[in-house]
Amino acid sequence: MPSAATFTVDEVEGVKRTERLFSGKPVTNNERFAAVLDDLLTPRSQMWHALLPQDEELAEDQDVKVYLERLNKLLFALRYRPAANFAAQKAQGYLSVGAFGNSCLFVDEDVGVGPRYRQIFLKEVFWAENHVGVIDTLYRKFTLQARQALQAAKQYGWTEVPPRIVKAAENEPFKEFDFLHCVRPNEDLVSRRKDYRGMPWASYYLALEGQQMLGVGGYSSWPYAIGRYMLAARETYPGDGLLGGDPDLERGEENHPAGWAESGRSAAVTHRGWGAGAVQSAFRGVESRSTQ
């Protein structure tokens, strides 16, 4: 997918990324694949999800059915409201699954309004599984403009934003800074607490500028929806996407460049090297200083 061909280089907006594209067929096939998934799994014109109680007896209660039906319609309306941005972000996720075999959708909450969705570029994230193969840890390195950092601070309650970022927001509001977000199991869970200490998932935001911890919080449910297509045995990241089903594309035959096969694998390789090194070491360094 040329639009996402920036795994190993720094992206620059507006740069043409199709110089090495010898055939448009892989791109077209991926767009068709994404369109089929969108139409079958999340059609906008149909109520594609439903709420059911775990108790089978309650499932037969008429009052419960009416309540859950109303709640389901409300959830559908909130998800597809323009500010939630679900449809556009999910479409990007389907393209990512087809091209690289992976996708990452961040589900945030606008308190008092409803959920918000953002597709995360795979270059930014590294995730790990627990002992049963379920993803339970994620590190994300991302950039924010100085003005955006202050907006995030207001929303998430960051009280100690590095002074250089605050100053830049006044003089250079579009200057970018690097941040980290880590979500992992809450090892200090206190079930009776009603704040983040009583939530099963711990959340940490850090600024690489000054290596400063910005905020500690939590989630009641896992906030990153990870999509993995055709996951091979003993793998954490699928590496091929649609390429795994096209042997001609793997061999570079029928006007398909062999480089397309390597681009999918490079995404997974980049994840492993980048996440295990830079993200975790940076997080541990800031975490250790914050506890001193």
Image (cartoon, rainbow, N blue to C red):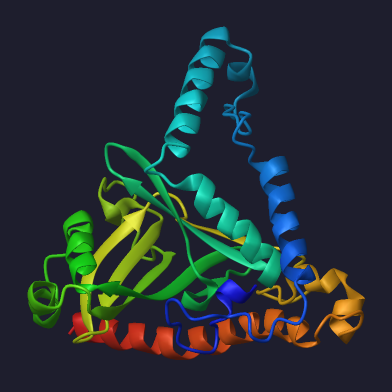
The percent coordinates of residue 13 (x first, y second) are 42, 77
- Could you say which is closer to the camera, residue 25 or residue 190? 25
The percent coordinates of residue 111 (x first, y second) are 27, 42
Q: How many marks?
A: 0
- Could you say which is closer to the camera, residue 257 or residue 45? 257
The percent coordinates of residue 277 (x first, y second) are 47, 91
**At x 71% / y 73%, what residue is drawn?**
238
Q: Quadrant of the C terminus?
A: bottom left
**At x 42% / y 84%, what residue is drawn?**
279
Tell me where residue 286 sits by quadrant: bottom left
Q: Quadrant of the N terminus?
A: bottom right
Tell me where residue 128 sits by quadrant: bottom right
The percent coordinates of residue 72 (x first, y second) are 51, 26
Q: Does residue 70 appear left or right of residue 113 in this picture?
A: right
**88 in relation to 286, above or below:** above
Task: For residue 132, say whether it is visible.
Answer: no
**145 in relation to 208, above or below:** above
Task: For residue 213, say whether it is visible.
Answer: yes
**9 in relation to 225, above or below:** below
- Could you say which is closer to the camera, residue 10 or residue 219? 10
- Could you say which is closer to the camera, residue 126 or residue 256? 256
**At x 69% / y 83%, what residue is drawn?**
263
Q: Does residue 125 appear left or right of residue 229 in this picture?
A: left
